[in-house]
Image (tube, rainbow, N blue to C red):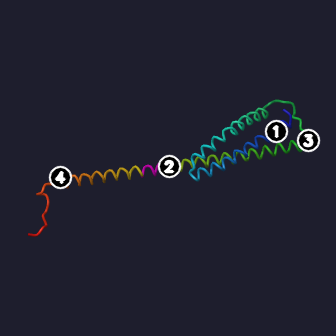
Amino acid sequence: MTGDELSALVDERLRLVEQLMELTQRQVAAIAAGHMSELMTILAAKQSPLTRLSQLSKQLSAQVGAQVPPRTWASQADRQRCRETHRRCEQKLLDLIAQEKACEQDLSAGKALIQQELDRTHDTGRALRSYASVSAGFQSHAATASAGDRLDLSSQ
């Protein structure tokens, strides 16, 4: 693989990482706003760039370990630019991974809050049913009470 071909792969990889970072920013906003359907759309949109990024990473890894004759570069400046682009890409990839972990933690925290709210709602429903049962029993008892069970407060 020539220097120009390697440089093209590194440039494409950087472009994909930047695209994924943009989608991840939208993902963060969707999670914060609780828009789960939007989140699902964003996650689906990330699949294609992630697949391509994985392919490129494998190609680049193969080139690093390959025993090839020295790579030819148009100039030393092109080689340095490729090296710098690769370094930037690796840093952005680390940032992207950190953002993804934060998203996962935010989703887990949101899930825990939802579960607490559901538990509270369930407990409230159980208490209301219990009160309704007691109230119905009291009303039923009052309706079936005999006349001797009542006090007559009328004056004669």
Residue with the mark numbered 3: 75
Residue 79 in magenta stretch: no
Q: CA distance from mark 1 to mark 3?
A: 15 Å
Looking at the rendered image, the disc whose residue lies closer to the viewer, 3 or 2, is: 2
Q: Amino acid at mark 4?
A: Thr
Q: Do the residues bearing badges 2 and 4 touch, measured as CB atoms within 8 Å?
A: no
Q: CA distance from mark 3 to mark 2?
A: 56 Å
Whole-percent x, y for residue 63 in the image: 79, 33
What secondary structure is the magenta-colored segment mainly? helix
Q: Residues within 10 Å of mark 2 (few under 14, many from 20)?
A: few
Residue with the mark numbered 2: 112
Quadrant of residue 142 within the rendered picture: bottom left
Q: CA distance from mark 2 to mark 4?
A: 48 Å
User: Looking at the image, is mark 3 or mark 2 earlier in the sequence?
Assistant: 3
Looking at the rendered structure, which numbered label has been put on residue 8? 1
Magenta segment boundaries in residue numbering = 113-120
The residue tagged with tag 3: helix, strand or loop?
Answer: loop
Tell me which residue sits at (42%, 51%) in the image.
121
Whole-percent x, y for residue 143 in the image: 19, 54
Tell me which residue sits at (86%, 42%) in the image.
79
Q: Residue furthest right?
A: 75
The residue tagged with tag 1: helix, strand or loop?
Answer: helix
Looking at the rendered image, the disc whose residue lies closer to the viewer, 4 or 3, is: 4
Whole-percent x, y for residue 80 in the image: 85, 44
Tell me which residue sits at (80%, 42%) in the image.
11
